[in-house]
Amino acid sequence: MSEFVFATAQYESGDWDSAPLVPANIIDTIARYTEIAVAPTGVVVRLDEERMLRYPLLYMTGHLPVRWSDAERRNVRRFVDRGGMLFIDDHNHDIDGTFHKTATEEITRTVGPLAELPNDHPLYSAFFKFDGPPTTSHELNGWGDNLVHKHLLAVQRNGRIAVLYSNKDYSSEWNYHPDNKRFQSVDNTRFAVNIVVYALTA
Amino acid sequence: MRSRRSLFESTCRIGAFAVLGWLLGASVIPSHAVRVERATNDDLAARLSAWTRETRSTLFHVDVGVAAPDARESAWLAALRRSGRRVSWSGAPLALAVAAEPLVNPEGGVRIDLAAPRGTAIALRDSVSAIDSLRVADLGGTVATPLAVGVVRAIAAGETASVVVPAPTVVKAVVVVGAASWEGKFVASALEEDGWPVDARFTVAPRIDVTSGGGAPALDTGRVAAVIAIDSTIDAYGPALERFVRMGGGLVLAGPAGMSRTVASLAPGMLGERTHPTVLPTDTIRLGSTGFYPVARLRDDGVVLERRPAGIAAAARRVGAGRVLEIGFDDSWRWRMAGAPGSEAAHRAWWSRVVAAVAYAPASIVRSSAASSAPLADLARALGPARTLAEAGPAGTGDPRIAITIIMILLLAEWASRRLRGRR
């Protein structure tokens, strides 16, 4: 049985590797709380290569404007049509910023418009129970747009999330070495388990 | 006093003359006790009611030509025979049979099976229009149609076999069981997309399962049509799984699930070591191109469904009233995600066929007195095999060849006795 491999999407236009510690941290979290067979290291896949289709859950982030090439758009469209799930997080936490504006524009153009995900969606109870998207320390500290975003956004296909978009800057929240979890009273990466479990079971 | 030999010779002579006399008498003196009534297919319907009023001593003979009488007429003839009348038939109708059963498929449909001599051209119709036509190969022919209305008729060489279209099957739930994985997820997705009701149970952590649909229903054929086991988590069902299969439920053992101890008595065979072919990043992914678990040791009653160079990729077996299908592929999701254009539809259709092959469907038998699904068989069952009128013959005359044979034997015996007289 093939393992779950955490894959980070590399795209041409921006700083796709702005949160290099996130993959290891999420892999650690998955291994810590679940029995899911997870590969100990993640992979980076280019969106303009068909190889990206081999990883049904892709994580994408950045600070800079997102402009997908034709090949990237084509692959993302195929990826979503075939049942893959793309998780995109705005590393700026700024709805006025260039990443948010350009990324949402690309998503809408490629796979369809984003809509608010209700806070009682099964994603929030896929493993741990949440009342909605967990707030991040950057939100509470007024970073970026100084807003606490109450909802995640999503494009759904056949009742399943195909693209999950976050303004909450989980990339900053999770971008630390897994060993530092011991300094936290509550593990702030638990929502990542919900995202992975949802992707694997929905 | 006459010797015994002399007595014997006299007896033979008298016996031969007696049989000859009886034979002559039977051929000359009309037997007013027996009448013969004949009909063909064309006038049989008109003659039947009159035949019913005939005396029991009448012999009824029907020359059916190339087509058996319809179900009503055959039943009438059978009733005449059961009432004590002699009924016979002759002719050469085509041996044709048709059966219909509902497809176990969310979209419904009917499967029509045909049997006829090789090379027979058959046209299929239902009560509304033509369905299809085919030429029978060695073992018959099968047609699957999404819709059939009323009565399906198979028409060939003047013969017609009919069967009432069965009611569509109510498709019950398919249960998918496994550890949380891409394979389980995409199997469940594919089946749901194709219209199957899916109840999934995926194990995520000890005592933590993620369920969807109806969750993890009890396994009984009233609610569940089939179970798909993705891996050894199927062990959790224990003996209930075997009971379910023996009652008629379907079981698909995908990938390593065949190694589970719970299914050891059910699986068509034992799995061997998984193959790991080399797959380059530029390769197009197809079903099984990333390897599979071959069925290394097939049971005696296992049937090979797919054989590849690396081994048996799929095998099946009947267990009680149910069916078990063992497929060695554990990475079919790669075919869907990274295969050639159209692979997601192909993956969906493939899994739908796999489930349909084993899913429990209660038998739906609809009989109609107006429809005969095997006219020649029905005719033979009702009236016996075909016989000529001479073979059927008026009762009491017997076969004249037997009488002639008796005469010959008696005369031969008398001659032999005379010839051997005096020899020592």
Image: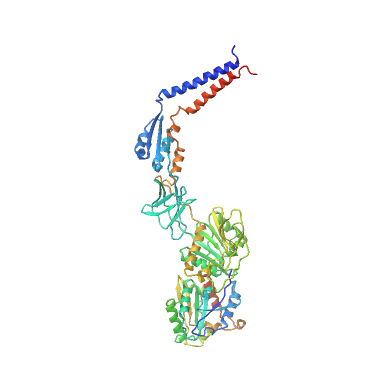
Closer-to-camera residue (B206/A165) = A165
Closer-to-camera residue (B3/A110) = B3
Looking at the picture, how far across and down is residue B78, in whole percent?
43, 38
Closer-to-camera residue (B424/B288) = B424
Q: Is residue B62 above or below residue B317?
A: above
Determine which quarter of the picture holds residue B132.
bottom left
Left-right relation of B235 to A77: right
Q: How many marks?
A: 0
Looking at the picture, how far across and down is residue B6, in whole percent?
58, 16
Looking at the picture, how far across and down is residue A100, in whole percent?
46, 84
For the N terminus of chain A, which image quadrant? bottom right
Left-right relation of B222 to B259: left
Q: What's the residue at 61%, 19% (across, down)?
A: B420
**Does residue A22 show up?**
yes
Left-right relation of B127 to A98: left
Q: Residue furthest left?
A: B46
**Does residue A129 show up?**
no
Q: Residue furthest right?
A: B424
Looking at the picture, how far across and down is residue B277, in whole percent?
59, 68
- The colour scheme is rainbow
